[in-house]
Image (tube, rainbow, N blue to C red):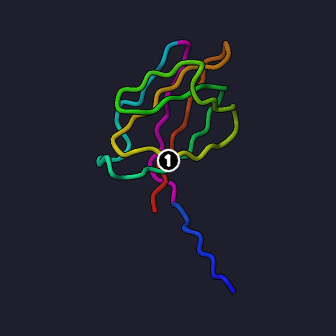
């Protein structure tokens, strides 16, 4: 029999990022070390597109996040998230860092 282990993540701090028709970026980076992998849970009140990096700028060609759904992504420590609306509606992207 193969033993499978699931590593559970605990929700940490949540950042609310308001987005409009211009790219908005988080004030602080997630994690501090470039060798860290940071697990983030994303949820948006309206459809948006996101980008991540040290100085990201989101465009409507970037990763799409639907409204009311939850996405899990892994980014490099020291990176920020940028968001822009994907429709005519402004909204908020909730970004929760998941801690082990």
Q: Is residue 20 magenta?
A: yes
Q: Position of residue 23 (x, y in %)?
A: 48, 18
Q: Quadrant of residue 81?
A: top left
| Left or right, residue 55 beside residue 52 | left
Q: Residue at x 31, y 46 (%)?
A: 34
Q: Is residue 66 left or right of residue 74?
A: right
The residue lying at 49 percent from left, 34 percent from top is 16
Query: x and y percent of residue 10 in the render?
Result: 51, 60
Which residue in the rendered view is the most extreme toward the left? 33
Q: Which residues are magenta?
A: 10-21
From what the image shows, is residue 96 above or below residue 20? below
Nearer to us in this view, 51 or 31: 51
Q: Which residue is mark 1?
A: 74
Are there few (<14), some (14-19), or many (20+) residues within 10 Å of tag 1? Answer: few
Quadrant position of the N terminus in the picture: bottom right
On the image, the x and y values in percent for residue 99 come to 45, 58
Assign a secondary structure to mark 1: strand
Q: Observer-nearest residue: 1 or 56?
A: 1
The percent position of residue 43, horizontal first and vertical second, equals: 61, 38
**Which residue is at a point 36% across and 30% down the rendered structure image?**
27
- Is residue 30 shown above or below 91? below
């Amino acid at each position: 029999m193969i033993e499978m282990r699931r590593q559970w993540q605990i929700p940490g701090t949540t950042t609310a990022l308001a987005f409009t028709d211009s790219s908005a970026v988080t004030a602080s980076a997630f994690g501090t070390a470039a060798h860290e992998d940071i697990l983030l849970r994303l949820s948006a009140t309206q459809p948006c597109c996101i980008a991540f990096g040290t100085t990201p700028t989101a465009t409507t060609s970037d990763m799409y996040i639907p409204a009311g759904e939850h996405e899990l992504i892994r980014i490099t420590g020291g990176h920020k998230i940028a968001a822009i609306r994907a429709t005519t509606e402004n909204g908020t992207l909730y970004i929760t860092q998941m801690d082990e």
